[in-house]
Image (cartoon, helix red, strand yellow):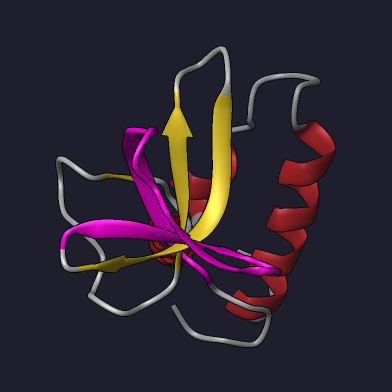
């Protein structure tokens, strides 16, 4: 066993993992010799993965068939088809989508809105 703290060893292992990515298989001896350290590394990886998944979920396109946004809250919308997609900011009022343009608000009547996602500005929570 090493005289290093678990935190120092984790940092060393993270560096080693980064160096080994794509070069050769991960050496397995470290986790056999330090099961508590391996447990901590796995817990950290799982925690970071959960945080990343939560962040991705906040920014995904939500199908309108899954759910609609809160009324009177501006969101980004995706309309049209894969050949001619249309993305804009819009409000859902009384079951009708209203697109916000610099010159005013117009009704969306000719497009099928397929997805939406919240508008999250930098520094804002989703």
Which residue shows up at 25% across the image and 57% down it? Answer: 96
Q: How many marks?
A: 0
Magenta span: 95-119
Q: Is residue 27 visible?
A: yes
Q: Quadrant of residue 54?
A: bottom left
In front: 15, or 115?
115
Residue 100: x and y, percent? 55, 65
Q: Is residue 38 visible?
A: no
Q: Is residue 100 magenta?
A: yes
Residue 16: x and y, percent? 78, 47
Residue 43 lies, with reference to residue 31, above or below; the image says: below
In front: 100, or 58?
100
Looking at the figure, which quarter contains the C terminus?
Answer: bottom left
Residue 23 lies, with reference to residue 120, above or below; the image says: above
Residue 115 lies, with reference to residue 67, above or below; the image says: above
Q: Quadrant of residue 51?
A: bottom left
Which residue shows up at 32% across the image and 36% down it? Answer: 114
Q: Is residue 46 magenta?
A: no
Image-based side of 115 in relation to 74, left or right = left
Q: Main secondary structure of the magenta part?
A: strand
Residue 11: x and y, percent? 73, 67
Which residue shows up at 46% across the image and 41% down it? Answer: 78
Residue 99: x and y, percent? 48, 59
Looking at the figure, which quarter contains the N terminus?
Answer: bottom right
Find the residue positioned furthest to the top: 83
Which residue shows up at 38% across the image and 33% down it? Answer: 110
In front: 65, or 59?
65
């Amino acid at each position: 066993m090493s005289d290093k703290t678990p935190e120092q060893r984790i940092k060393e292992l993270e560096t080693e993992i980064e160096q080994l990515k794509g070069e050769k298989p991960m050496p397995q001896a470290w986790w056999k010799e330090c099961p508590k350290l391996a447990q901590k590394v796995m817990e950290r990886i799982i925690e970071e993965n959960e945080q990343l998944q939560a962040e991705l979920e906040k920014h995904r396109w939500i199908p309108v068939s899954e759910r609609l946004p809160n009324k009177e809250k501006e969101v980004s919308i995706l309309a049209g088809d894969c050949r001619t997609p249309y993305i804009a900011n819009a409000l859902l009022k009384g079951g009708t989508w209203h697109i916000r343009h610099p010159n005013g608000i117009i009704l969306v009547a000719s497009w099928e809105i397929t997805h939406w996602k919240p508008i999250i500005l930098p520094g804002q929570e989703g």
